[in-house]
Image (spheres, rainbow, N blue to C red):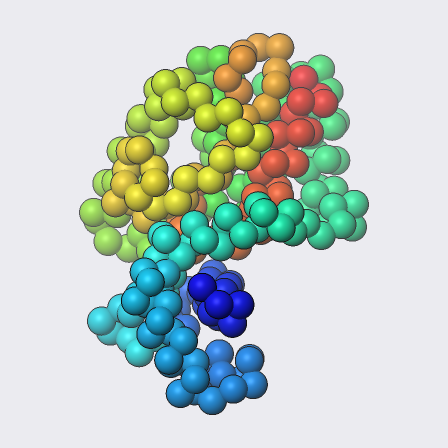
Amino acid sequence: MTERQTLILNAIIEQYAEVAAPVGSVMLAKLFGVSSATIRAEMARLEEMGFIQQPHTSAGRIPTDKGYRQYVNLLVQQHEQPNLLQDRSVRAIEARVSQHNGHADRAIRSAVNSLVELTHNLGLATIGDQLYISGIGNLFSQPEFARGEHVQAVARLLDNLEPWLKEAAPNEPLNVFIGHENPIGKASGCSLIISRFQSPYSDRSYIGVLGPTRQSYGKVMQLVRHAGSMLEEVL
């Protein structure tokens, strides 16, 4: 993939996350200062490589799971993080979680609820045999889940999430499972962004969010990672 194709893919993903509508060549041409024909040619190449696709109802393009994976891998490689101390969202998590120092249940619930409010996704945590979930309404209010089959796939993912985490035990500080990468609910159109954290209550403690693949991955990944770090400090 060329540098320009990478930039175009990134722009499609970020624009799609913001507007929830297929991204067309006219908008991208203005953004990059080139002709629409040039953008269409590059989009055609990205589509051939499987990074974007064209919904049959639109002339615009949306990312595929492969496109999102390319984007997330690049974020991880480049370690793109704004100054966390200046991020109001991060400070909000710190303020809410730290006030429950010594109270594990309250701290975990506060961290999960903070992620729900800040990411507009479903928030979840599992520690020991207890599963915390909040924000189901957020998830099902997304336009991606207007169809019944998606709702069923998401429900199946949630029903099996805790036993799967016990079995798989993802051990990276931050794990991102995009769309079909989810071992359950492959057709759900969801991304699970989850952080493992150390706690005195369980050697398999996790906190994260579940939302549509149409995510602001950079921000959400940072917030999930930071929520896990805050729980390690408090617990």
Relative placement, left or right, of 92 versus 73 is right
Quadrant where the N terminus sits is bottom left
- Rendered view: 109 above or below 82: above
- Rendered view: 185 above or below 72: above
**Residue at 33% across, 62% down:** 49
**Residue at 41% across, 40% down:** 177
**Residue at 40% across, 87% down:** 37
Res 151 seen here: no
Judge by depth and name the residue closer to the eye, 108 or 228: 228
Q: Which residue lies furthest to the right in this view?
A: 85
The image position of residue 199, as x and y in percent, is 61, 15
Q: Which residue lies furthest to the front in this view?
A: 2
**Residue at 24% across, 73% down:** 57
- Rendered view: 78 above or below 38: above
Q: Which residue lies furthest to the top in this view?
A: 201
- Rendered view: 12 above or below 228: below
Judge by depth and name the residue closer to the eye, 47 or 185: 47
The image position of residue 93, as x and y in percent, is 68, 38
Res 14 seen here: yes
The image position of residue 119, as x and y in percent, is 54, 47
Quadrant where the C terminus sits is top right
The image position of residue 56, as x and y in percent, is 22, 71
Exactly how many numbered labels are in the figure?
Answer: 0
Relative placement, left or right, of 146 versus 114 is left
Q: Quadrant of residue 91?
A: top right
